[in-house]
Amino acid sequence: MSDKDKQGLIGRLFSRKKKEEGEKPSEPESRDALVEEPAGTAAAEPEIPAAAAERQETPVAGEASGHQAKEPEKPSGDEAEPEGRESAGLFSRLKKGLSKTRQRFVGTLDGLFYGKKQIDEEFLEQLEEILLTSDLGVQTSYRLFAEVEEKVSHQALEDPEHLRSFLQQEIQKILQGAEQPWEIKTKPYVIMAVGVNGVGKTTTIGKLAAIFSAQGKEVLLGAADTFRAAAIEQLEIWSERAGVPLIRQKMGADPAAVSFDTVQSAVSRGVDVAIIDTAGRLHTKVNLMDELKKMKRVISKALPGAPHEILLVLDANTGQNAINQARMFHEALGITGLVMTKLDGTAKGGVIVGVCDELKLPVRYIGIGERLDDLRPFKADDFVNALFDRV
């Protein structure tokens, strides 16, 4: 396809669909997290953050305080099934979680394919529109369509059913590249979790803490989202549920100081994993992104080589805007892994394909529900089979 045709293809996207790039991220619980400091007022980066003396530590549930922690969320439903039926139950929940995306994308494809015996020009025009409006992203949609066009022109694809299989295989190849082992080789292994407001970052951290703890790892949490009291309280509840300690300071404290404290405590305790929460950042706000860069530098001073994982949490509801978020966070911080949340509540789950195709980053976990076991390791084959499975 010529450059002129490519431009026409992209142009038709914006005539058929509102521009996703203009979507606003979810509103934060508090506007405090979006307040930018006036130029020149940012605190100097400390060699060692001075706020360590103000640290407030939430002990492991049931320790000296005598506080009885809440029990972690208990799996229910399918997890109660015998072991032989567990895989079928997990796949069933994944399929249910992806139902809206499957209906919007694969369901629309099947509607186009139904009753068609051959691939003609009109068919290709309709296919082009479906790809461009499926939240796969412009670049990925163009690439897939160009490959289809080439195969049709060489008569390598001659009927809609083969085309359906071809698209499934191509999407599977993209996602298989994002399925990489998450190996925790160092101790402590420091994870810095980032993302815009409202993506479910703190909840994801709490669930990860429970997952790692259930694997027999010692976990420590750091509440470095000091802009919102609610974020600290939410992480404290999760630390109690998971039975892991929490390092926190008062609201408004320097997030870098909390991060430094968390890493130092992780080293002295000999824990396996330390997960540091951060305040929601709009990826378009330079001052706020600079704060994250400062935290990353301070963490590396506390422990050379850390953070070992910079985990970006994305909300599938944002559609193609998630691709922009991932790109800008990656440019600023060097993202090493992704978590895609809220796939069960959106028809825009196809964005995970675009993110993986453009950025080539591993997807660690996906969220398909509210329960603890609905945050599950990403398996490309399971995801694609659930997406393309005929009801």
Image: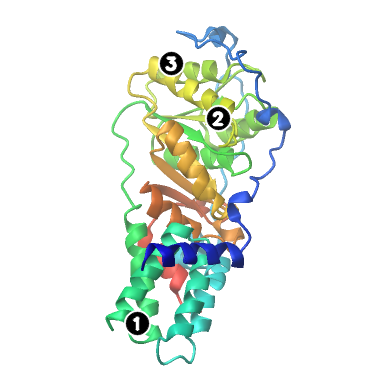
Q: Is residue 84 visible?
A: no
For the residue labelled by badge 3, is the local secondary structure a helix, a strand or a loop? helix
The image position of residue 351, as x and y in percent, is 50, 57
- Amino acid type at circle 2 is Thr
Q: Earlier in the sequence, mark 1 or mark 3?
A: 1
Look at the picture and state if 373 lies above or below 68: below
Of all residues shown, which one is farthest toward the front? 4
Rendered-image quadrant of the N terminus: bottom left
Look at the picture and state if 351 lies above or below 286: below
Q: Which residue is mark 2?
A: 278
Q: Which residue is mark 1?
A: 162
For the residue labelled by badge 1, is the local secondary structure a helix, a strand or a loop? helix
The picture quadrant where one finds residue 190 is top left
Q: Earlier in the sequence, mark 3 or mark 2?
A: 3
The image position of residue 198, as x and y in percent, is 63, 42
Look at the picture and state if 122 lies above or below 3: below
Look at the picture and state if 116 lies above or below 106: below
Q: Which residue is mark 3?
A: 264
For the residue labelled by badge 2, is the local secondary structure a helix, a strand or a loop? strand
Residue at figure coordinates x 59%, y 30% from the top left = 279
- Amino acid type at circle 1 is His
